[in-house]
Image: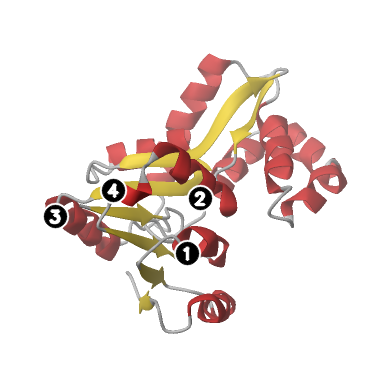
Amino acid sequence: MNLVLFDFDKTIVNRDTGAAYMKFMLCRNPLRLLFCFLSLPIFIPFLFHAKSKCIGFSVLLWLATLGISVRKIIHLRESFIRMYLNDNSTIIFKDAVQQLLLHSSNADEVIVVSGASEWMVKAIFAQKSLPKVKFVCSEETRFFGGMISKFHCYSSRKVKRVRELFDLGKYDSIIGYSDSSADIPILKLCNKRYIVNPTPTCFKKFTRSFNKEMAVLNWA
């Protein structure tokens, strides 16, 4: 049996789902958006470094949800998913769905490993009736009247969480799909690597890390 690791944003879906959610939450309230803008000097520096990105994301998420009840947040999440999937600019790559179906039919263990929050990835899979998979994603928790990131599943943290949850030695092969050079650490676990619609900058980084030991896929 093979272990198959899929990134989500820009690998299965063409957009950054977490960024779209933040925009949705902030733009619904002009005062909250203004407060967030005034707080930019606090959290923006954290977002530019992999090790501190979780802090910056948590501050932004907290500002976007501060003072909103859990019940209301659940309602807003549902509204966001409907809006996101009804937006014509949101595309689930047909090629990604075909690969998910192929691996599922081969009895491979398929895991979506994403920096997006688990609730949003699961909701999109459910709404679009995508193949049954397992999820290793970012997690949110309640903190002083808002939500923060409990675990940010990003870069080397993906490797740590996958190793914690799965016995990698029991699989015949490990296969990885990603668009982002931030996933180089987890792709190093893989015997086969598929790079999806890479930007020129990411392609250079992938090439430096893997040379020809990868395949580039142009998905639509």
**Mark 2 touches mark 1? (CB < 8 Å):** yes
Mark 1 and mark 4 in contact? Answer it, CB < 8 Å: no
x and y percent of residue 217 in the render? 34, 75
Residue 125 placed where, x, y %?
31, 42
Q: Earlier in the sequence, mark 1 or mark 4?
A: 4
Please rate how many residues cluster around mark 3, counting C-alpha atoms within 10 Å: few if below 14, some from 14 to 19, many from 20: few
**Left/right of residue 100 with respect to residue 182 in the rendered view:** left
Comparing labels 4 and 3, the label whose residue is closer to the camera: 4
Image quarter hosting the C terminus: bottom left
Residue at numbered disc 1: 188
Crowdedness of circle 4 by 10 Å Cα count: few (<14), some, many (20+)?
A: few
Mark toward the viewer: 3 or 2: 2
Judging by the rendered image, the residue that carries numbered circle 2 is 159
| Mark 4 lies on residue | 170
Q: Secondary structure at mark 4?
A: helix
Among all residues in the image, which is located at the extreme left? 105
Q: Residue at x 70, y 24 (%)?
A: 66
SS of the residue under disc 3:
loop
Q: Which residue lies at the image location 20% right of the left edge and 60% below the top edge?
A: 98
Q: Earlier in the sequence, mark 1 or mark 3?
A: 3
Q: Amino acid at mark 3?
A: Asn
Q: Earlier in the sequence, mark 3 or mark 2?
A: 3
Q: CA separation, marks 1 and 3?
A: 23 Å
Residue furthest front in the image: 169
Where is mark 3, residue-wise? 106
Q: Residue at 36% across / 49% down in the picture?
A: 168
Callout 2 secondary element: helix
Element type at marker 1? loop
- N-terminal of the pair, mark 4 or mark 3, is 3
The residue located at (53%, 45%) in the rendering is 160
What crowding class fits label 2: few (fewer than 14 Cα within 10 Å), some (14-19), or many (20 or more)?
Answer: some
